[in-house]
Every structure is written in C-alpha cells, then in structure tokens.
Image: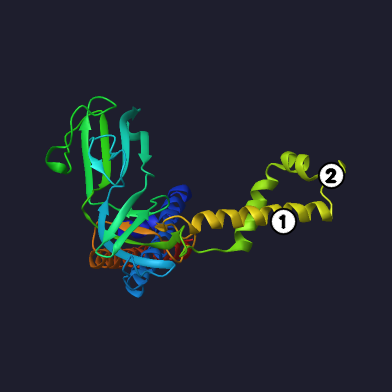
Amino acid sequence: MPDLLTWARYSPPDDFWVAAGVLILLCIGGFIGAFWFYLRKSVIEDTPTSRIRSAAQGYVELVGMGKLIDGPPIIAPLTGTICTWFSYRIEERRRTGKNTNWVTVEKGVSDDLFLIQDETGACVIDPEGASVTPGANDVWYGSSKQPMTRPRGGGWNLIGGRYRYHEERLHPDEPLFAIGLFKTVGGAGGDFNVDADMRELLREWKRHSESLLKIYDKNKDGQLDMEEWQEVREAAYRKVMADYNKREGSTPTNVMGRTGDLRRPYLLSAVSQRGLERRFTYYTAGLIALFFIAGSAATWLISMRLAGG
C-alpha cells in the first residue's frame, strides 16, 4: 500500500492520468453494460411466450426448433457445416517490433432466412440485426488463410498457428428461442397501413425525381405544382391498393425481424430462455461489481493525488 500511495501521489502526470482514465472508462463501461444486460433480462422475463399460430402482431417471444427453408442449404464457410445461421472470423498473427497481435483478415455473418417451428406453425426468421447466442462456438488454428482442417471435437483447439479461425453457428433441428418484431405478410391477415405505405412509396419515387417530372410535369416547368402532385399521390394510392389486392390473394407468411427500438432487443438463441436469463443475471452482477471496483479505485487514486499535491 505505501508503494501504491507513493505512486498515486508522485508518479509522472502522464502515467497517472492514463491509469486514472482507464479506471474511469471501466467504471462507465461497467455501468452501461450492466444496464444493457439488465434490460435484456427484464424484457425476456416480462414478455410471455406465444404460439406461432395465435401470436399477435408486434413484439413477440417464440420457442421452437430451427429449420431450413426449402432450397439451397446454408453452409458455414469454414467448417462446411449445414446450419441455419453462422458468423465467422479469420485472424492472422502479426508481429510489430516485440509485440504480437491477432489481426482480423476476413469475417462475415449469415443473413439468409430460416424458420422457427413449433407445434402450431412456422415463422420465417430474418437474422439481420439480431443479437445471436449460438449453439456451436469453434476456435482452431492453422498455417493457411483458409482452414485445411476442421476443429477437433467440435470445441476450442488451442494449438498455435499463424492463423486463427472462429466460427459460431445455429443448427437445424436445434432448440431456438426468439424474441423480436412479429408480423404477418400477405393474405387477408396481413397488416395493412395505407398512409404509411403511401409515404414510403412517395419517398422512393422522390429519389428518382427526373422520372417523376417526366411523367407528371404536364406544363414542363421543371417542378410539380399542387394539381400535378395530387396526381402523383393518386397514382401512389392506386399502386398501394393494387399491392394489397395481390397480397390478400396470397398465402400469409409469418416473419420475425428486428424492431428498430433499443428498448426491445431482437434476440435469437440456442440457449433456453431460463439459460439466457441466468447468463444475463451473471453479466449484470459482474459489470456492477466492475462499476464499483473501478469507480472506487479511480476515486481513491485521484483523491490521493490531490491530497499529495
């Protein structure tokens, strides 16, 4: 303690304030991280599980099995495993002076659609923007950028090599927990909002203003007056209603995707609901501990520095 006290009071300013800054950043990060995981835990606890057939439109929690959609399978690029979702990263060991670091040279995340299925029906999962807790997490090493071997035993193979491969996956016929924005597309049960769809269509048309003027600028003055703009709105209304008529004649499809609301996270997990709750509880507790420890250490260091000055 005397040595630390001496360092706190008389160390070079650059060294001291770098250390104090790191502690302050850890304190802030612990607070934000604890809130982040506590929010996820609370959302899972407060959202009841729905059956796919009777699920309401909106923010919904589903429990079922992951399934592939008919067509070409989804194949993880490093292991060649058939899966419903993957994320991968290839890192290269590089030396800079006396230091050795791992540098990411290639990475990717699957955005292909797949299904969650329970005893009442199926729902298409759009994984874009989801926070995914995978069922498989493999790390292994090799001497070439593209792996020549697969991970042994389906786990972490900590044998050195110039390249390190990291692949996460969700698998078909694996239990899947999903919570996100549920909506039905097509069919008479579709969610129709004429005003919103017209606004979106008009925004799209405005991006192509030259085509819009060519069709609706009757007096050729280079702009749309009130009457001409009304014609544009009427054309947009006819287009939206025609799309609705086509959708009503089609088979309804349930789709889950991201919400766009930070208070309502989009989560996909091979870990069960209870398992996720426990995991988020541990993360929250650990980050709260980091907040108090780092905050207390930073406060002590700065107070000793000011007292010594």
Q: Residue furthest left?
A: 153
Residue at 81% over, 49% down: 224
Q: Residue furthest top?
A: 144
- Ranked by sequence position, the earlier of labels 2 and 1 is 2
88 or 233: nearer the viewer = 233
Q: Does any portion of residue 98 appear in the rendered image?
A: no
128 or 13: nearer the viewer = 128
Question: Residue 28, position in %: x, y?
Answer: 44, 61
* Type of amino acid at the residue the image marks with label 1: Glu
- Displayed quadrant of residue 142: top left
Question: Vertically, is 58 above or below 138?
Answer: below
- Displayed quadrant of residue 89: top left
Under circle 1, the secondary element is helix
98 or 276: nearer the viewer = 276
Characterize the local packing of mark 2: few (<14), some (14-19) or many (20 or more) Cα atoms within 10 angstroms: some
* Type of amino acid at the residue the image marks with label 2: Lys
258 or 309: nearer the viewer = 258
Quadrant for the N terminus, please.
Answer: bottom left
Residue at 24% over, 64% down: 119
Q: Residue furthest front?
A: 249
Residue at 33% over, 28% down: 95
Question: Vertically, is 47 above or below 71?
Answer: below
Question: Residue 248, position in %: x, y?
Answer: 49, 59
Question: Residue 234: which numbered mark, if any?
Answer: 1
Question: Residue 165, position in %: x, y?
Answer: 26, 36
Question: Vertically, is 12 above or below 50?
Answer: above
Q: Is residue 41 left or right of residue 18?
A: left
Question: Residue 126: which numbered mark, if any?
Answer: none
- Displayed quadrant of residue 111: top left
What distance separates the C-alpha of mark 2 from that of mark 1? 15 Å
Q: Which residue is mark 2?
A: 218
Question: Residue 232, position in %: x, y?
Answer: 74, 52
